[in-house]
Structures are given as C-alpha cells and as structure tokens.
Image (tube, rainbow, N blue to C red):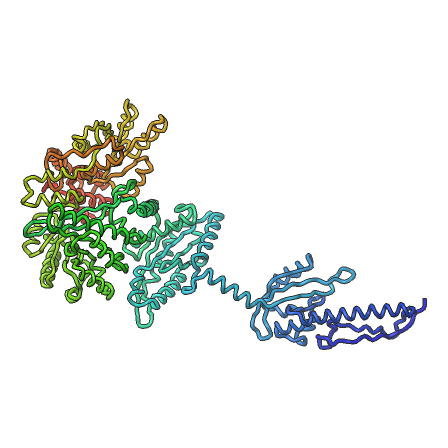
C-alpha cells in the first residue's frame, strides 16, 4: 500500500470561546507530513462529500445551539468549563472570557454545600444523568433559581470525557408559584397560616405525636370585644389590632408551635410534643399576658383581652373535626366565664355542643311542624286591678325535646336566621288572639309583642307589622311593640326612623327591661316611645336594697315627667305591689297576679277579675277544656307519694285505669306481668334504684323480645336540659314533659299520644283553682303544704352547705313536687337554687334558701 501526504482545508467558524479552546468547530486540515494511503479519484470524491456533509451537520448543530433559549455549558471530566452558548451569557450575565477555563463550581459557590456537590457527582457516576434546581448568583450578584439537567459524554473507552449541562431560569415561575402558595396557605392580613395550612400542620402534629407517644394541644383563641373596636374605631384600626395581636401570639409560643388565623377575630394554635398539661398552662398564661399591654395605634390606646378554649389529643376527640368542635365549645365556656381566661374541654361541653346541634336541627322544622304556641302574662292596672293588656311570650314544645326554654332557642334562631319567620308568625298570631278577646267580650285588651334587635334591624319590620294589623283586623292602638333598651342605645338614625314610622301607624312603643342600659333622660327625650318597663331585677330587691328602690322611684318620676306610662315587671309580693302603687307606677305584671297563661286560661283570668263575671268563672273554664285520654290503661311511676296522688287527681273523671309504681324496677315488673297491655306509660326520670331511663330501655327490650306493639312512653320530670331530653329519646321515650305543668297540658299531651278513639274532651274541674294551684287540686292543698313544711325544715338543716350533694338532691325532689302541683313561683326559686348548689357562692345560696323558706311560709 502506498501513502501520500496531503492537506485539505475546510471553512472555519469563529469559536465562542474567544479563541482559547475549540468550541463547536474543529479544523479538518490534515496534519503536515501525515502520510495517507493513495486512493483513487472516485474514493477521494466520496470522502470529500462525506466530510462536507459532516461539516454541514456541525454547522446546523452550531446554529441550533447558538439559538437555543436554554443555557448550555460543557465541562471536561474535571468539571472545568470548556464551552458555553450565547443563552448562557444572556441568562447569567457571564461572558465566555469570564467562565471558560474555570471550574463549574464557581457558578454555585456559597449556595450548594460540598454534600450537595458530592450527591450530584455520585448520581452522575451511577446513572450518567442528574436533574434538579440550583440556586446560583447571576453576574450582578442577585440569586436566581435554575432548573438544570446534566449528562455525561463518554469516550471510546467508556470514560467520562465531557459533561453537558442544559438549564433555564425558573426564578419568576418559582416566585409566582410561591406567591400563589402563600396566598392559598397564609392570611394576607396577619401573614399567619390560614385555615387550610393550619389543618395540615395539625394533622402533621397528630401523626408525630402518635409516633412519639406524646400529646398535642389545640387552642382556639377569640379576641374579647373585638366587634366594639371595629364599630367604634373603624375597620382600619381593627385590622391593625389583628396584626399586632398575631405578632404577640407568635412571640408567646415555643419553637415548633404553629399559630394561625382561623377567621375574623379567632386564632388557632397547635402545641406539639406535649408531655404534661403544665406545659400547656404555661403557654396559656404567656398568651394572656401578651395582651396586657395596650395596642398603640395612631393616637388610640386599645386595650383588649382574649379567651382561650383548649382540647388535648389523645383524649378529647378521635379526629380533627371532633377536636375542632370541642375546642370551640371550650372557647365558648371561657367567654361565658367572664373572658380573659381559658377553659379546658370537658365531656359535658361536648354533650352541650351536640345537644345544641340537635336543637338547631329540630328548630329548623319547628315552625312548619306547628310546634310553637303563645302564652300571655296579664298586665294589671295597679289602681283598679283590671287587666289592661297582656305580654305575648313564645313557647316551643318539641315532640322529642319537650318544652325548650326561650333563652335557649331565641338566640339560636337569631344565629340561624330563623328569627324573622318565627317573629312574623308570633306577631300575626298575637294580633289574631287579641282580636278574639274582643269577640269574647273581654273588652279592649291590648297585646304586647317583643321584637328582637336582630329582627327589628331587618329592613321590612314595618311591612311585617302593617301586614299583621291588616290581616288580623286589630286596631293599631291595641298593639304594643316592645324593644330593648340596648337597641335604642345604638343611636342609629335608621332605628329612630323605623320607630317613628311604626308609631305613625298608631302602634304603641315600649322600652323593655328599662334601667339596665344606662339611658340618660336627655337621650330618652329624643326617642318616640310611649311606655317604660322597669326591669324585674330592680323590683325583686327594692324593698331590701335602698339603691334599687331609689332607682325605681327615679324611673317612675322620669317616666311621668315625660308623659310616659310606667310598667313594673316581676311583681311577686303584695308588699311590692303596695310600694309601686303608692309611688305612682301605672301597671304591673308578675306571678303575684298570674304566671304566663295559655290563651284559654288567660281569657278565664280576665273574666275572673271582672266584677260582672266573678260569680261564675268556672263556667268559662269548661268552654276550653281541651282533650284527654279516655278509659285507657295507664302505668305511672314516681317515687314521691304526693306526685302520684296529684297524677291520679289529674286523671280523675277520665275513666282511665291507673297502675302505680314507686320506682323503675316496679314499673318494669308490672309491664312484664300485665295480662292486658298498657295503652300509655308515664315515667319520672329520676327515681332511686332503677331510674326512668333504665326502665324505658327495659320496657322497649321486652316489647322487642315479645313481638309486642310499641307503647307510648312519656317522660315527666323536673329536669329541663338538652342532655336529659336527648337521653330520654335514646332510651325509648316518645314525649318529654317538664314540670311545672298544668292539668290541661298534661291531659292534652297524653291524648296526643293516643288514637282518636281513646280520647275525649277533658273533664271539667269542680272549682276554679287559685292563681298557682291547678284546677281540681284544691282539696290536696293540705297535703302539699304538709310536704312543703317538712321540706322546709330539711332545707334549714342543710343550709350550712356541709353536704351540697344532699342539698341538691333534696331541692330537686322539691322541684318535682312543686312542678306537678303547679306552684310555679316556688318552682322557679328552687330551679335557681338547684343551679347554684353545686358551685355557687355561699351568700347567693343562702339568699335563695331564705326566699324559698319565705315562699313556703306564705303558702
């Protein structure tokens, strides 16, 4: 073979590397003196064409690289930069002269530690590729985030010859993503985690606590009185308070704890890795102390406190939802305890929260289910003794819950937005009833309806009143709208305009509970009102408290000076009546005259105080006796002899066969042994041994086992809590009746549980009862008084509070007797006493004991 020496020039391309190192082009000149084999012309031509094609490919690759939007950098096996593309310089700001020939690590120096570089090299060595984000400075020193992909290029022997890195700047995208993430997970006002991120942190803390066998504390924090700050100083100041409060809360926490803004003026905190409750208490005190210093915002010094509810996991809830609910319940208890304090969750709180939820469910269908009814408390002219009007009071009797107190369901109705339809129904029903009084010859007796502030502030209250008057046909002068003093103190032009519009209809306006809102005389002169009602709290103690007496005298004098009628609420004694009459009070209401009465009983009461009808009031009672069970078999269980005697008298004349039991066990045994099934069962809930709850469950079990039809069971008890009602329902009761209860109400409730063929008109009472004694029970008055005298002596023995538990049980038993007998004043006093016995102050309990003893003495 023969060799020849030749040279062959190819067109050269400038090097990006500035002439230091070849970048993408290379010389194809054969080295001088190289001997190559002699080849034929045709072969040489093919070789030249091949070289030309490769040059074109290289030129194309060079164009692609030059115009690529991503930066490209090539290093040798030792990571020394040997080539870059124009995008590299455009993105980083570094020219080829500044980086070619230098180690690639210079680009990330200070941001990636040695470990990160080592991990990158290890990945490249094993897999030949690496991808990730690198934070590196641009030439101006500003940090940027680059998304990088690095690949190894190996030589013919398989060794790494070069490394090629392709990258792009993702700084803007990263910042946009982070901003979106912050917006989704952080509160923009306080910069604390929001609800979403907080729940995620809570879940993480629970998982870690489960692994480490530790506990987690969940805190719900509510700012006390924050709404007043917004209303008085404006929302801008309110926002600043929230921001400063957030900073103080964060500063009060331990490292690793999470604070978040849950919404409005509520914050949440997760305390992780808790080993003892004392750790939680320490943080709580720090949080409360953090708000002791006032917030200085512009020229304002804002002083605010917070209330905190706490629950712990494990123990206070099985999942996040339960923990949140229980912490909220604890927060509500803290606010009710006086604020600026904290409360740990207890199972009783959960029971109340669950009961409230059930109460809301039942309330939503109460209006449609026709479960509301009205009672009327007479307003009496203190000079003539005649009934001039009646205050309308709303009552709710739910099939499962029994009688629900207005103090429980009215605030809930406002919260749920149900107060408007309920209030509209109440107003319409009251106007229709007042018109009915006229048709029965009772005269022009007015009716007063209390409008809640929430309902009053709704835009259409004037139209609702106009519609009620129009549809009922009642004269406007016979309708009184009662509003609270607190509503007047808002001093809203809108409120005053509404009052003037209502008054222009001819309707009377009355200020309820006057004296509790600190109204001034000059302010009152500007308001379009006609009546002042003195709050019952002042009437109760005015004969023993000089300050209350002075305030009552001042309200009467002030009202008369402004030509306003003055009404006293809560008159319970003859002495109170005499005092008020002597000092010029116009009218009054209270248990001294009458408790709230059903429509029929109110009509009877009006007639009984009318001289023209005084001779035959019992005849009027017969016209509205209602329904009653007739000729049925009734099983009744109660451990108090007097209650069983009263129950038998209640059913006197109905033809019912009554089987009595002294406790739950006896009731179950009588049910088991009965040859004929009972048509109705009435059980007291609290009896020694087997109580009513257990007895009802046992009876239901016997029915299921024997394939018997379900017998209606009614709970009759002095208790009235949601927990008792729902426990009764779960035990198998069909109806819940709370004492005090009138004879007609009990008979009608029993009749509602029976088919029509087992009911009839309620038998009439032989004589008209006194104000607090149900019709037909006058002959049992000596028995009742004898029982009360014995109970009174026992109360004196327990008055030293040496055994509060026994005192509470004794008071509860007395409530049962009074409730069944209808002595509502004493029942109310005993209810208040029972609530105080467990944890009340000794002075308060002693004062109530004295009132109970005094009331029994008056009986």
Q: Residue extending furthest right? A: 1
Residue 282 placement (x, y as % from top left): 37, 55
Query: What residue is rendered at 75% in x and 71% in y?
Result: 59
Residue 36 placement (x, y as % from top left): 89, 70
Vertical placement of residue 143 versus 517, above or below? below
Instruction: State which quarter of the image contains the N terminus.
Output: bottom right
One can see residue 440 in this view:
yes
Q: Quadrant of residue 824?
A: top left
Residue 88 placement (x, y as % from top left): 64, 71
Q: Is residue 6 or residue 309 the one in the foreground?
A: 6
640 sits to left or right of 317: left
Instruction: State which quarter of the image contains the C terminus.
Output: top left
Vertical placement of residue 654 versus 830, above or below? above
Vertical placement of residue 82 versus 316, above or below? below
One can see residue 724 in this view:
no
Looking at the rendered structure, the number of numbered marks drawn on it comes to 0
Residue 51 placement (x, y as % from top left): 82, 69
Query: What residue is rendered at 45% in x and 59% in y?
Result: 255
Query: What residue is rendered at 26% in x and 56% in y?
Result: 455
Q: Is residue 47 or residue 450 the one in the foreground?
A: 450
Vertical placement of residue 109 versus 320, above or below? below
Query: What residue is rendered at 64% in x and 68% in y?
Result: 70
206 sits to left or right of 556: right
Q: Residue extending furthest top? A: 675
Q: Is residue 472 or residue 209 the one in the foreground?
A: 472
Q: Quadrant of residue 61?
A: bottom right
316 sits to left or right of 603: right
């Amino acid at each position: 073979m023969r060799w020849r020496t030749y040279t062959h020039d190819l067109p050269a391309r400038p090097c990006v590397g500035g002439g230091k190192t070849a970048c993408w082009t290379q010389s194809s000149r054969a080295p001088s003196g190289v001997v190559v084999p002699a080849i034929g012309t045709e072969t040489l031509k093919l070789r030249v064409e091949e070289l030309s094609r490769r040059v074109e490919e290289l030129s194309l690759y060079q164009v692609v690289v030059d115009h690529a939007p991503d930066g490209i950098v090539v290093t040798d096996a030792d990571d020394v930069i040997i080539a870059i593309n124009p995008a590299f310089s455009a993105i980083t700001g570094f020219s080829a002269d500044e980086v070619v020939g230098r180690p690639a690590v210079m680009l990330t120096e200070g941001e990636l530690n040695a470990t990160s570089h080592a991990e990158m090299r290890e990945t490249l060595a094993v897999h030949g590729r690496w991808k990730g984000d690198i934070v590196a400075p641009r030439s101006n020193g500003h940090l940027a985030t680059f998304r990088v992909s690095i690949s190894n290029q190996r030589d013919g022997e398989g060794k790494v010859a070069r490394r090629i890195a392709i990258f792009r700047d993702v700084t803007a995208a990263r910042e946009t993503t982070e901003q979106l993430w912050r917006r989704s997970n952080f509160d923009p006002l306080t910069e604390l985690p929001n609800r979403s991120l907080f729940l995620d942190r809570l879940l993480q803390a629970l998982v870690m606590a489960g692994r480490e066998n530790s506990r987690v504390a969940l805190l719900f924090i509510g700012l006390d009185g924050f709404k007043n700050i917004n209303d008085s100083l404006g929302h801008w100041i309110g926002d600043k308070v929230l921001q400063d409060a957030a900073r103080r809360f964060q500063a009060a926490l331990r490292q690793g704890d999470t604070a978040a803004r849950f919404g409005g003026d509520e914050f949440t905190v997760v305390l992780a890795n808790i080993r003892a409750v004392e750790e939680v208490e320490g943080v709580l005190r720090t949080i409360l102390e953090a708000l002791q210093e006032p917030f200085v915002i512009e020229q304002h010094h804002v002083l605010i406190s917070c209330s905190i509810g706490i629950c712990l996991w494990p123990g206070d809830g099985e999942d996040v939802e339960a923990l949140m609910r229980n912490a909220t319940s604890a927060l509500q208890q803290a606010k009710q305890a006086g604020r600026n304090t904290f409360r740990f969750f207890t199972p009783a709180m959960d029971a109340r929260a669950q009961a409230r939820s059930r109460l809301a469910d039942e309330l939503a269908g109460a209006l449609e289910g026709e479960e509301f009814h009205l009672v009327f408390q007479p307003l009496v002219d203190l000079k003539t003794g005649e009934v001039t009007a009646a205050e309308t009071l709303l009552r709710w009797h739910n099939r499962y819950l029994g009688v629900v107190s207005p103090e429980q369901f009215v605030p809930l109705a406002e919260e749920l937005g149900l107060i408007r339809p309920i209030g509209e129904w109440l107003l319409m029903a009251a106007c229709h009833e007042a018109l009915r009084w006229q048709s029965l010859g009772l005269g022009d007796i007015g009716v007063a309806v209390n409008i809640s502030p929430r309902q009053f502030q709704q835009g259409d209250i004037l139209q609702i009143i106009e519609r009620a008057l129009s549809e009922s046909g009642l004269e406007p002068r016979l309708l009184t709208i009662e509003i609270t003093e607190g509503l007047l103190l808002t001093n809203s032009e809108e409120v005053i305009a509404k009052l003037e519009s209502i008054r222009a209809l001819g309707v009377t306006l009355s200020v309820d509970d006057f004296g509790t809102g600190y109204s001034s005389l000059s302010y009152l002169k500007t308001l379009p009102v006609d009546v002042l009602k003195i709050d019952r709290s002042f009437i109760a103690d005015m004969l023993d408290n000089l300050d209350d007496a002075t305030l009552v005298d001042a309200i009467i004098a002030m009202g008369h000076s402004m030509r306003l009628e003055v009404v006293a609420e809560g008159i319970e004694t003859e002495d109170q009546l005499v005092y008020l009459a002597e000092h010029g009070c116009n009218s009054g209401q209270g248990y001294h005259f009458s408790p709230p009465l059903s429509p029929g009983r109110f009509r009877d009461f009006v007639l009984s105080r009318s001289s023209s009808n005084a001779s035959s009031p019992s005849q009027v009672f017969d016209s509205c006796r209602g329904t009653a069970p007739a000729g049925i078999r009734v099983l009744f269980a109660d451990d108090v002899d007097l209650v069983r005697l009263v129950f038998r008298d209640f059913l006197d004349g109905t033809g019912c066969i009554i089987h009595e039991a002294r406790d739950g066990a006896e009731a179950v045994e009588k049910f088991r042994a009965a040859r004929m099934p009972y048509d109705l069962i009435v059980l007291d809930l609290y009896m020694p041994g087997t109580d009513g709850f257990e007895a009802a469950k046992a009876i239901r079990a016997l029915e299921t086992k024997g394939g018997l039809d379900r017998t209606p069971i009614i709970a009759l008890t002095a208790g009235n809590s949601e927990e008792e009602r729902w426990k009764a329902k779960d035990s198998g009761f069909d109806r819940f009746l709370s004492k005090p209860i009138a004879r007609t109400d009990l008979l009608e409730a029993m009749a509602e549980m029976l088919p029509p063929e087992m009911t009839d008109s309620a038998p009439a009472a032989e004589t008209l009862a006194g104000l607090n004694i149900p019709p037909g029970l006058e002959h049992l008055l000596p028995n009742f008084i004898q029982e009360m005298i014995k109970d009174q002596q026992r109360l004196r023995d327990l008055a030293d509070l040496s055994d509060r538990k026994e005192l509470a049980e004794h008071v509860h038993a007395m409530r049962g007797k009074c409730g069944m007998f209808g002595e509502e004043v004493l029942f109310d006093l005993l209810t208040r006493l029972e609530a105080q016995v467990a944890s009340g102050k000794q002075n308060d309990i002693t004062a109530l004991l004295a009132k109970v003893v005094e009331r029994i003495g008056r009986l």
